[in-house]
Image (spheres, helix red, strand yellow):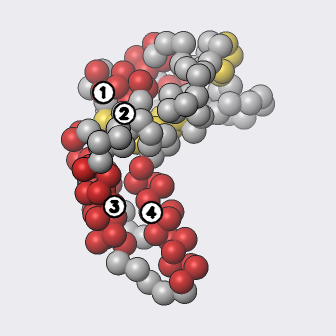
């Protein structure tokens, strides 16, 4: 795991991707199964960007790169990871499922998560404003959805 901020917690390195400074990530990334971007870097409307994606080369080739950003559907981080042959997922699935769970809590009744998730993805895929999902991300999210029991 890579975490912004400071501290000497084992297994966690501190690195600022926007300015390219911090701890050496080699020891942490070489054994990582998943890299999660929980920063706004790469989000539509955010001017700060990753300086480079060289750190992705330190991840194992079978690592998953998960970007919590869902707009744009394919961030520069996900595109760079995909170029290296890594599995990628954006944050749309997490956004949709947290909304569905919030509806259940607010309405105090169960909703058909599977049907609603599919309907939302279909609707977003048909839009022309850039929210539609690229096919590889859609496939990864469909697999994730099938393997996740909420």
Camera-nearest residue between 48 and 32: 48
Disc 1, disc 2: CB below 8 Å?
yes
Q: Nearer the viewer, mark 3 or mark 1?
A: 3
Residue that mark 1 sits on = 82
- Residue at position x 46%, y 54% in the image: 94
- Residue at position x 30%, y 21% in the image: 84
- Of callouts 4 and 3, which one flags the residue occurring earlier in the amino acid sequence? 4
Relative image position of residue 140 (x, y in whole percent): 28, 46
Q: Quadrant of the N terminus?
A: top right
> Circle 3 — which element?
helix
Report the side of 139 relative to 53 (left or right): left
Relative image position of residue 147 (x, y in whole percent): 31, 60
Residue that mark 2 sits on = 74
Cα distance between the residues tagged 4 and 1: 24 Å
- Of callouts 2 and 3, which one flags the residue occurring earlier in the amino acid sequence? 2
Report the side of 14 relative to 44 (left or right): right
Q: Quadrant of residue 76?
A: top left
Report the side of 142 relative to 35 (left or right): left
- Of callouts 2 and 4, which one flags the residue occurring earlier in the amino acid sequence? 2
Residue that mark 4 sits on = 97
Residue that mark 3 sits on = 120
Camera-nearest residue between 78 and 49: 49
Report the side of 108 relative to 15 (left or right): left
Cα distance between the residues tagged 4 and 3: 10 Å
Q: Dot 2, how many residues are within 10 Å of its Cα: few (below 14), some (14-19), or many (20+)?
A: many
> Circle 2 — which element?
loop
Q: Dot 3, how many residues are within 10 Å of its Cα: few (below 14), some (14-19), or many (20+)?
A: few
């Amino acid at each position: 795991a890579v975490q912004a901020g400071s501290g000497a917690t084992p297994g966690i390195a501190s690195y600022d991707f926007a300015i390219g400074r911090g701890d050496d990530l080699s020891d942490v990334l070489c054994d990582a199964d998943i890299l999660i971007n929980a920063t706004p870097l790469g989000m539509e409307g955010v001017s700060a960007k990753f300086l480079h994606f060289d750190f992705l080369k330190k991840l194992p080739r079978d690592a998953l790169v998960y970007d919590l950003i869902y707009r744009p559907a394919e961030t520069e981080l996900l595109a760079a990871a995909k170029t290296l042959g890594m599995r990628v997922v954006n944050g749309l699935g997490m956004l949709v499922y947290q909304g569905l769970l919030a509806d259940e809590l607010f309405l105090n009744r169960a909703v058909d998560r599977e049907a609603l998730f599919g309907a939302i993805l279909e609707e977003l895929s048909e839009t022309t404003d850039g929210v539609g999902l690229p096919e590889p991300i859609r496939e990864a999210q469909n697999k994730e959805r099938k393997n996740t029991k909420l």
